[in-house]
Image (spheres, grey):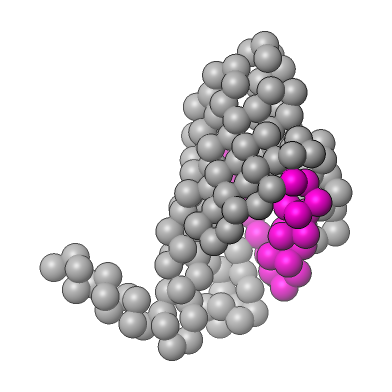
């Protein structure tokens, strides 16, 4: 892939995630290969239909989600995007905004065929659960001493 095409694909990926919601998941096909391999701390998914279904479940009850891309490093076949996600879910953090720092590794040719997200699952989920959150924060505080 040429540098111009790689830049366009990564730019399209960023624009997609800036606008992605439960009502426009069909747009995933614009950047992802049909045989996409997607991994995050919770799941590994193979194939665009499975990825679309996964996102449909994730986005179903999300009230707000936004990605702030902090840095992009790329060449003609892969990219690393460093980001902060802000989201709110009625069952987490009393519906308040949650901030999650993360990084996405993308590998591509004409489209993205590999996407792996790295983030702290505690920061995203566990710390905001009613019973578990206090325990995890306590453990983190003790580990930091």
Residue 137 belongs to magenta span? no
Q: Residue at x 58, y 58 (%)?
A: 43
Q: Is residue 128 above or below residue 100?
A: below
User: Could you tell whether 59 is left or right of 125 in the image?
Assistant: right
- Front-most of residues 7 and 50: 50
Instruction: Indicate the position of residue 114 as horizontal and vertical percent values.
Output: 62, 37
Which span is picked out in magenta? Answer: 47-69
Q: Is residue 99 above or below residue 30?
A: below
Q: Residue at x 54, y 24 (%)?
A: 74
Image quarter hosting the C terminus? bottom left
User: Could you tell whether 123 is left or right of 17 in the image?
Assistant: left
Outermost residue, top direction?
2
Residue 49 belongs to magenta span? yes
Instruction: Indicate the position of residue 70 as horizontal and vertical percent values.
Output: 50, 39
Q: In which image quadrant can residue 21 be found? A: bottom right
User: Could you tell whether 90 is left or right of 27 in the image?
Assistant: left
Q: Residue at x 54, y 61 (%)?
A: 42
């Amino acid at each position: 892939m040429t540098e111009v095409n790689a830049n366009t694909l990564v730019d399209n990926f960023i624009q997609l995630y800036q606008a992605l919601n439960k009502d426009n998941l069909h747009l995933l096909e614009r950047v992802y290969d049909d045989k996409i391999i997607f991994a995050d701390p919770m799941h590994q998914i193979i194939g665009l239909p499975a990825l679309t279904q996964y996102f449909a479940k994730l986005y179903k009850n999300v009230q707000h989600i936004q990605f702030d891309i902090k840095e992009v490093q790329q060449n003609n076949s892969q990219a690393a995007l460093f980001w902060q996600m802000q989201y709110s879910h009625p069952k987490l953090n009393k519906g308040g905004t949650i901030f999650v720092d993360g990084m996405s590794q993308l590998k591509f040719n004409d489209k993205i065929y590999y996407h792996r997200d790295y983030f702290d699952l505690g920061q995203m989920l566990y710390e905001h659960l009613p019973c578990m959150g206090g325990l995890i924060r306590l453990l983190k505080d003790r580990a930091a001493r």
